[in-house]
Amino acid sequence: MCGRYYIRHKMYENLPAFLIPADYKCEDRDILPSEKALILRKANARMEAGVLSWGYPSKQNGGLVINARAETLHEKPMFCDDVMHRRCLIPASGFYEWDRSKQKATIRVPEEELIYFAGIYGIREGVERFVIITREAAGEMCRIHERMPLIVPGSRMDEWFSEDYREIFAAAMPGLDIQIENEQLSFF
């Protein structure tokens, strides 16, 4: 699962300047569900950026659906049309997860200032929104959580936007650097 990710200003140095909207603040920040964040998508065979809200409204509980499982993405009415026609990439520096002891883990790809989460987007309740696609955890991530974001290597960005995008689902995930912090989740 991915319920919070982060951006560090060095990440922006790795994006072409034309992909950063003029009014977008390139600063260190954590991105939480419902917040607006930078996404990349293809339009008329060209890469473009957008600033969309994270999460699709849920009809069941009034909350937000922030992730979509790669394994069932094509079967779910909420996601199937978007995965076929509206795929995106979410640039990030890394993400956070809380382990079974509720300790916060900061997770990143070693030596990468910029990574991309696979995502989809669509218009819901009149607002352009995105969700992050998740997959089963791999490697060291298994000891933290059973799910993780689907990470698309920069070298495979074009493939994510092509008709062969399904091959990304089976690709090996990069090695991760996981740092457990002393901050714990509070339920007060």
Image (cartoon, grey):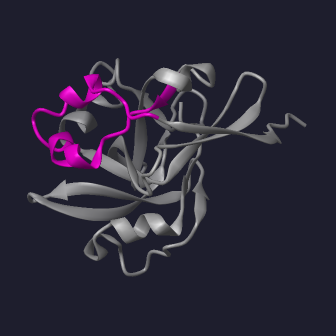
**Residue 167 image point, x, y percent:** 19, 27
Residue 23 on the magenta span: no
**Residue 11 image point, x, y percent:** 44, 63
| Apparent side of residue 129 relative to residue 81 in the rendered image (left or right) | right
| Apparent side of residue 52 relative to residue 35 in the rendered image (left or right) | left
Q: Residue furthest right?
A: 188
Residue at (32, 26) in percent of width and height: 172
Residue at (16, 47) in percent of width and height: 158
Q: Residue furthest bottom?
A: 22
* Residue 13 appears in the figure: yes
Q: Give the image quarter of residue 84.
A: top left
Q: Give the image quarter of residue 14.
A: bottom left
Q: Give the image quarter of residue 182.
A: top right
Q: How many discs appear?
A: 0
Residue at (78, 24) in percent of width and height: 101
- In this picture, is 167 found above or below 85? above
**Residue 95 image point, x, y percent:** 55, 44
* Residue 137 appears in the figure: no
Pick the residue in front: 55 or 98. Answer: 98
Pick the residue in front: 179 or 47. Answer: 179
Residue at (90, 37) in percent of width and height: 188
| Apparent side of residue 11 relative to residue 8 in the rendered image (left or right) | left
Pick the residue in front: 167 or 124. Answer: 167
- In this picture, is 25 found above or below 109? below
The stretch of residues the image draws in magenta is 147-175
**Residue 180 image point, x, y percent:** 71, 37
